C-alpha cells in the first residue's frame, strides 16, 4: 500500500510570489502564484464542469500570467485535512487544490519528468 502524500508545511511568500509546500516525503515544491492561478481547479476557470479533471492540464506549465490582482494571493486556507483553497486579490476563491492535484502540479524538473 502506498503511503498518502500530504503537506508538512505550507508557506506563501507574497514578495517572491511563491507558495512553498514541504511534503511528508520531504519533497519541496515551489509554486509560482501565476501557475497556481492558471491551474485553478474550479469549474469557472476550467470552462465548466465537463472540463474538470483530477489532474492539472499540462498546458498550465506554459502559461505566463502577468502580475495583477489575479495572481496575488490574499489568503490560503485549509479545506479539512485534504486540500487548500486560495483567495486571490481579485476576489476569486473557488478552487479547491486537493493534495494529489497540488502534488501533480509541482513544477520542479523531477516531477515534470513523471
Image (cartoon, rainbow, N blue to C red):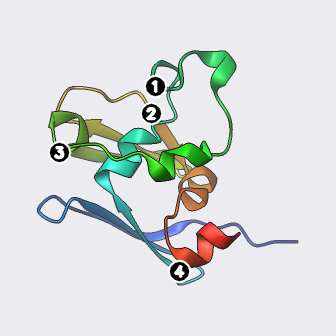
Question: How many callouts does the rendering have?
Answer: 4
Q: CA distance from mark 4 to mark 3?
A: 27 Å
Q: Which residue is mark 2?
A: 95
Q: Which residue is mark 3?
A: 67
Q: Which mark is residue 27?
A: 4
Furthest residue toward left:
15
Q: Earlier in the sequence, mark 2 or mark 4?
A: 4
Q: Which residue is mark 1?
A: 45
Q: CA distance from mark 2 to mark 3?
A: 19 Å
Which one is nearer the viewer's eye here, 95 or 65?
Answer: 65
Q: Decide: marks 4, 1 in contact (CB < 8 A)?
A: no
- The x and y percentages for residue 24 are 56, 77
Q: CA distance from mark 4 to mark 1?
A: 28 Å
Does dot 1 land on a helix, a strand or a loop? helix
Q: Please indicate whether residue 6 sits to the left or right of residue 32 in the image.
A: right
Q: Quadrant of residue 14?
A: bottom left
Q: Earlier in the sequence, mark 4 or mark 3?
A: 4
Q: Decide: marks 1, 2 in contact (CB < 8 A)?
A: yes
Q: Which quarter of the image is occupied by the N terminus?
A: bottom right
- The x and y percentages for residue 26 are 53, 84
- The x and y percentages for residue 15 are 11, 62
Q: Nearer the viewer, mark 4 or mark 1?
A: 1
Does dot 4 land on a helix, a strand or a loop? loop
Q: Residue at x 65, y 23 (%)?
A: 51
Does dot 3 land on a helix, a strand or a loop? loop
Q: Residue at x 30, y 48 (%)?
A: 76
How many residues crowd mark 2 within 10 Å: few (<14), some (14–19), many (20+)?
many
- The x and y percentages for residue 67 are 17, 45
Q: Earlier in the sequence, mark 4 or mark 1?
A: 4
Amino acid at each position: 500500500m502506498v503511503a498518502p502524500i500530504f503537506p508538512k508545511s505550507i508557506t506563501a511568500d507574497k514578495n517572491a510570489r511563491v507558495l512553498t509546500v514541504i511534503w511528508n516525503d520531504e519533497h519541496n515544491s515551489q509554486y509560482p502564484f501565476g501557475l497556481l492561478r492558471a491551474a485553478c481547479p474550479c469549474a469557472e476557470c476550467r470552462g465548466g464542469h465537463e472540463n474538470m479533471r483530477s489532474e492539472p492540464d499540462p498546458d498550465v506549465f506554459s502559461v505566463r500570467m502577468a502580475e495583477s490582482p489575479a495572481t496575488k494571493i490574499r489568503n490560503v486556507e485549509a479545506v479539512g485535512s485534504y486540500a487548500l483553497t486560495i483567495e486571490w486579490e481579485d476576489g476569486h476563491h473557488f478552487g479547491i487544490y486537493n493534495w494529489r492535484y497540488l502534488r501533480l502540479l509541482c513544477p520542479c524538473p523531477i516531477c515534470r519528468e513523471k
